[in-house]
């Protein structure tokens, strides 16, 4: 009986190892040099980490919904992002801004490169979405509402490209 449980446990462990070997790999998310400058000078570094975390989660969740798993590596770059409301750093540097009542158009632009195990590019994805006017806003915007929307749409495009290039 003990041997059976040991074999079942060993089989489960080897299956888990094989599954993780095929799992998508999302490389650390980078920022374009222009957006990095915006983060450093205007928005604040914590906003970059927040967007990086949100983008990583959105992409991994979109991949999981599609059952992606052939071992491609995904390199993501946040090219640009504009907030709908002032960031903490913006509000602290410009006293006239009201974190709750100041609102603007927002959005984001992102790029991804999907690579196979040999490092060859198998697909590239680009996506941008910005409001065109304040009339496009729903009224309940948070600091990064439209950037979130753009990131979710981008994540779905990345997952679609991933599945299309699965072998």
Image (spheres, rainbow, N blue to C red):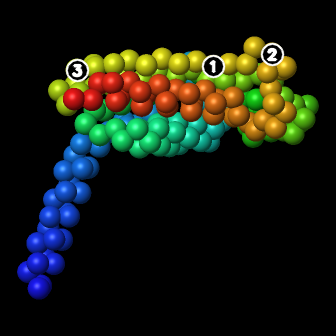
Say if mark 2 contacts mark 3, CB within 8 Å. Answer: no
Task: Say which of 166 and 146 sits in front.
Answer: 166
Q: Residues within 10 Å of mark 1 (few under 14, many from 20)?
A: some
Residue at 79%, 21% in the rendered image: 136
Residue 74 is situated, as x and y percent measured from the top left of the image, at 36, 31
User: Which sits in the foreground, 23 or 37?
Assistant: 23
Position in image of residue 155 (x %, y %): 49, 31
Q: Is mark 3 on a helix, strand or loop?
A: loop
Instruction: Say if 91 sits above or below 128 in the image.
Output: below
The residue at 28%/20% (across/down) is 122
Label total for image: 3
Residue 33: mark in rendering = none
As drawn, 67 above or below 121: below
Q: In which quarter of the image is the N terminus?
A: bottom left
In the rendered structure, the answer to whether residue 6 lies left or right of residue 116 reads left
Packing grade of label 2 (10 A; few <14, some 14-19, many >=20) is few
Based on the displayed image, in which of its 4 quarters is residue 65 positioned?
A: top left
Whether residue 73 is situated above or below residue 18 in the rendered picture: above
Image quadrant in which the C terminus is located = top left
Find the distance from the CA under tag 3 to the CA under tag 1: 28 Å
Regarding residue 60, the answer to whether it shows in the image is no
Q: Mark 3 points at which residue?
A: 120
Structural distance between the alpha carbons of marks 2 and 1: 12 Å
- Residue under label 1: 129
Residue 133 disc label: 2
Q: Determine whether the residue tagged by mark 1 lies in a helix, strand or loop.
A: strand
Residue drawn where x is 84% and y is 20% of the image: 134
Quick check: 37 left or right of 62? right
On screen, residue 131 versus residue 31, left or right, reads right
| Quarter of the image where one finds residue 149 | top right
Identify the element where label 2 is drawn. loop
Give me the residue at 87% from left, 39% from top. Answer: 100
């Amino acid at each position: 009986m003990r041997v059976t449980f040991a074999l079942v446990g060993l089989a489960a462990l080897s299956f888990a190892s094989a599954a993780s070997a095929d799992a998508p790999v999302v490389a650390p998310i980078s920022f374009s040099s222009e957006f990095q400058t915006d983060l450093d000078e205007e928005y604040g570094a914590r906003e970059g980490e927040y967007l990086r975390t949100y983008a990583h989660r959105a992409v991994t969740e979109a991949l999981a919904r599609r059952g992606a798993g052939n071992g491609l590596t995904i390199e993501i770059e946040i090219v640009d992002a504009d907030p709908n409301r002032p960031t903490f750093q913006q509000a602290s540097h410009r006293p006239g801004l009201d974190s709750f009542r100041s609102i603007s158009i927002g959005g984001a632009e992102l790029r991804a490169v999907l690579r196979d195990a040999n490092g060859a590019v198998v697909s590239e994805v680009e996506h941008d979405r910005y409001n065109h006017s304040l009339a496009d806003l729903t009224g309940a915007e948070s600091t990064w509402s439209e950037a979130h929307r753009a990131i979710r749409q981008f994540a779905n495009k990345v997952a679609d490209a991933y599945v299309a290039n699965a072998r």
